[in-house]
Image (cartoon, rainbow, N blue to C red):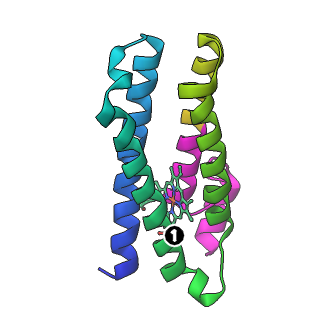
Amino acid sequence: MTTAQIFVHIHGLAVVLSLIGFITRGIWMLKDSPRLKAKWVKITPHVVDTVLLLSALVASYLLFWQYGANPAYVTVMIVGLVVYIGLGLVALRLGKTKAVRASAWVLAIIVFLYISAAGAMKTPTPFTSASAHTEAKA
Ligand code: HEM
């Protein structure tokens, strides 16, 4: 296994943990659970998301950036991460009503799943037949 592959796997693991944590905190938010205020619940997502981003940056450098390349799906993941963070902030912190927070939470999960599909299938259009065609040609 190459060093790049190791970082891609660390990234993939952090992705799974991040999604599980985000879904769990959203459910606690909807139920007004006091567990959301626990110290470890506030700190752990920052640790997981830092690992997610750092491993992504190292993998991107090793696989592409050091050769001056940048595939479209990596751009999708960077922009998608910013959108996901924004929606996550509205869902768990800034949203004024529960309806707004719940909507932002669902949208954030959809964005996250889209980014994951783009990463796993290595294409910015994972849900179209055109992407399968592109993959076949690559
Ligand atoms: C919420 C944000 C993100 C999610 C959900 C996500 C999800 C994923 C997933 C599921 C994979 C496939 C992992 C595997 O094959 O084991 C992947 C791969 C990858 N991601 Fe992300 N990612 C995110 C952010 C980023 C960012 C910000 C970058 C770049 C700075 C990035 C760069 C990469 C790279 C380079 C790969 C490896 C692709 C390859 O094997 O060719 N990701 N990502």
Main SS category, magenta section: helix
Q: Is mark 1 within 8 Å of ligand 1?
A: yes
Quadrant position of the N terminus in the picture: bottom left
As rendered, which of 26 and 116 lies closer to the eye? 26
Q: Disc 1 marks which residue?
A: 57
Q: Is residue 124 visible?
A: no
Point 65% across, 72% down: residue: 71
Residue at the spot 60% in from the left edge and 50% down from the top edge: 81
**Amino acid marked by disc 1:** Leu
Instruction: Report x, y in % for residue 68.
Output: 66, 86
Query: Which percent across, then down, holds residue 113?
Result: 53, 42
x, y percent for residue 36: 38, 23
Quadrant of the image occupied by residue 34? top left
Coordinates of residue 121 in the picture (x, y in percent): 53, 59
Left-right relation of 1 to 28? left
Task: Identify the residue at image location x=30%, y=36%.
Answer: 40
Left/right placement of residue 138 relative to residue 5 reads right
Q: Is residue 6 magenta?
A: no
Q: Nearer the viewer, residue 117 or 3?
A: 3
Q: Secondary structure at mark 1?
A: helix
Q: Quadrant of residue 18?
A: top left
What residue range appears in magenta? 111-138
Classed neighbour count for the residue bearing mark 1: other residues with Cα under 10 Å, few (<14), some (14–19), many (≥20): some
Residue drawn at x 63%, y 62% is: 73
On screen, residue 57 above or below 53:
below
